[in-house]
Amino acid sequence: MKKKTIFILLIVLLLVTVSITLAYIVEQTSTNSIITFGSLKLELIETEIIGGQEVRIEDGNSINITKTSTINRSVKVKNVGNHPMFVRLSLNIESKSKGNNYNPMDLIDIPILDNWIYQDGFYYYQEVLKPGETTPPLMNEINFDNTNLIQYHRGDELELKIKVGAVQSEHNNERVLEAVGWSE
């Protein structure tokens, strides 16, 4: 009986050792996973209405604002890629003159249109932008406080700076303000 008990204990010990070894071997198995990321492609479309026609604005386009207090300006984003996305824009008007100690944005009003929401310095398009689609305009005009611009900043050149960003909407939150992955 003593031999039988020792034999059974040895068998159990052998089985435990083999199962621990197998578990260790199984846990050490390596795998190769391929992870791919979709590429987002977009186009910023900045236009104005001239003679009833919508005309694209090229970089370096200049307008003399001493003759008008409002210019028509439209800013849209087109998804030219293959993946749906959320988009956001930031607008800033900067003085090209050195040494000015004013913020041109304090003398300018930009009425923002529907489907866009402002938060933390960005205008977010509230819908998913599907491939091939274009957002509605963020704005249609820029209004200037010409009295103060002319009186205090005559001869200054102002530049509209637009930055656009996007994150994929697939496998992301359902609402743009909750989406993750925005660059800083």
Image (spheres, helix red, strand yellow):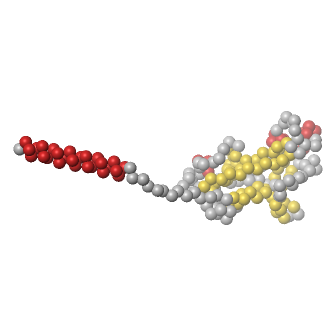
Residue placed farthest to the left in the image?
A: 1
Residue 121 in the image, given as x and y percentages of width and height = 71, 43
Q: Is residue 142 shown above or below 104? A: below
Q: Residue placed at 72% from the left, 59% from the top? A: 43
Residue 100 in the image, given as x and y percentages of width and height = 87, 36
Seen from the viewer's position, the closer of residues 57 and 177 is 57
Seen from the viewer's position, the closer of residues 67 and 62 is 62
Residue 183 in the image, given as x and y percentages of width and height = 65, 47
> Can you see residue 147?
no
Residue 126 in the image, given as x and y percentages of width and height = 65, 53
Q: Quadrant of the N terminus?
A: top left
Q: Residue placed at 62% from the left, 63% from the top? A: 82
Seen from the viewer's position, the closer of residues 71 and 31 is 31
Report whether 121 appears left or right of 36: right
Q: Residue placed at 84% from the left, 60% from the top? A: 49
Report whether 30 appears left or right of 88: left
Q: Is residue 23 shown above or below 135? A: above
Q: Quadrant of the C terminus?
A: top right
Tag count: 0
